[in-house]
Image (cartoon, grey):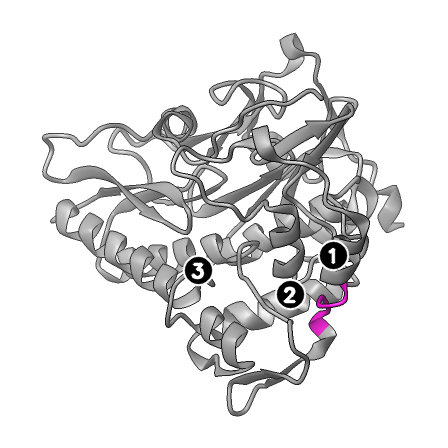
Amino acid sequence: MAKKLISTVTAAMCAAVLLMSGCRKASEDENDKSAYTYAMGTLIQVRVIGENAQDKVYAAQQELARIDDLISYRTEGSLAESFNNGHETDMSEIADLLELSLSMSEETGGAFDITVLPLTETWQFDRMEEDGFDSESMTVPAEEDIQEALAKIGYEKLDFDEESGVLSCDEDGVRIEFGAAGKGYAIGKTVRLLKEQGADAALISAGSTIACFGTKDDGELWKIAVRDPRGEVSDYIALLSLTDTTVSTSGDYERYFVQDGVRYHHIVNSLTGFPADSGLMQVTIICEDCALGDALSTACFLLGLDEGISLANKYNVGAIFVDTDKNVWYNKNSVFSSLEFKGESSGYTLCEYSRQADN
């Protein structure tokens, strides 16, 4: 069995991504500060430019931690943990995140599903190891275990009362998690806080989810790398020059193992019970709403190229899809104009999507 050790939450991985994002170590400039924090199961870097930058960095770190405690199913007392144990919880405080997750579940016909947790636990992709994700002990679950988990899946089993804000469910075993949109949600809320506090510019990067506004201290746009899904963590196939937007990426390389020549990754299709086999290696979404972008990157990956781009176009967001033949598809002229393609030497081909799926 061919196996490979993949570390998902390491400083080296974040540094590789953040280097291209324009982030750097903490500066002596009091109006330009940067620091790391750990939340949502990953290392996050916060860079703030403006007066009292250090205070604003600290406020951002506190906000990320607050939201993590609120939504993580692993955290005792969180809203997700409360629902999973009692099946009736007031979700008013995160109603927008819950509604987005339910909407995306419906948009994909259940391929993306807020109740996927029993499946990810069965596959053990939810495992949190001190040194990252260790694939050495991973194996395909028994068919009966997958079927048992599938019986507990189904967003339709949830009842959300928008007036009271209460989420409930009558079936035992149904459990929710916000992993597909929670990181973007937390980062989006943090960006809003920094703007309210008067920051001139900022970049918050959790590796696969990045938000930025304003410009760097030299007046330049933020440069964000689109990772090579078959390269090392520091390899990239494109650079995006952006501001006042967010970039979210989902790929089959963050947590995976190989068994009998087949790659099994952490983006599990809740309809089949298996990791998505959609012909894609990676999806990147560019849009103003960080939570939406985070959710869409996963949803579009699950749907595949045609249906995925159709969904991205429905929400009028920028998208970059990388298929298993190393074609790099973009859906909008605005994406092309902000993109510097670097993938030729690694065998990638840049292509404009014909939109035939939308005709």
Comparing 27 with 244, the one in front is 27
Residue beneath label 2, please? 115
- Amino acid type at circle 3 is Arg
Residue beneath label 3, please? 74
- First along the sequence among labels 1 and 3: 3
- Labels 1 & 2 near each other (Cβ < 8 A): yes
**Separation (CA) of disc 3 from disc 2:** 15 Å
On the image, the x and y values in percent for residue 151 come to 76, 67
Magenta stretch mostly in which secondary structure?
A: loop
- Amino acid type at circle 1 is Ser
Q: Quadrant of residue 43?
A: top left
Q: Residues within 10 Å of mark 2 (few under 14, many from 20)?
A: many
Q: Residue 270: give its label.
A: 1
Q: Residues within 10 Å of mark 3 (few under 14, many from 20)?
A: few
Whether residue 277 is visible, yes or no, is yes
Residues in magenta, as a range? 150-155
**Separation (CA) of disc 1 from disc 3:** 20 Å
On the image, the x and y values in percent for residue 55 come to 14, 51
Instruction: Say which residue appears at 64% left-offset and 60% top-offset.
Output: 118
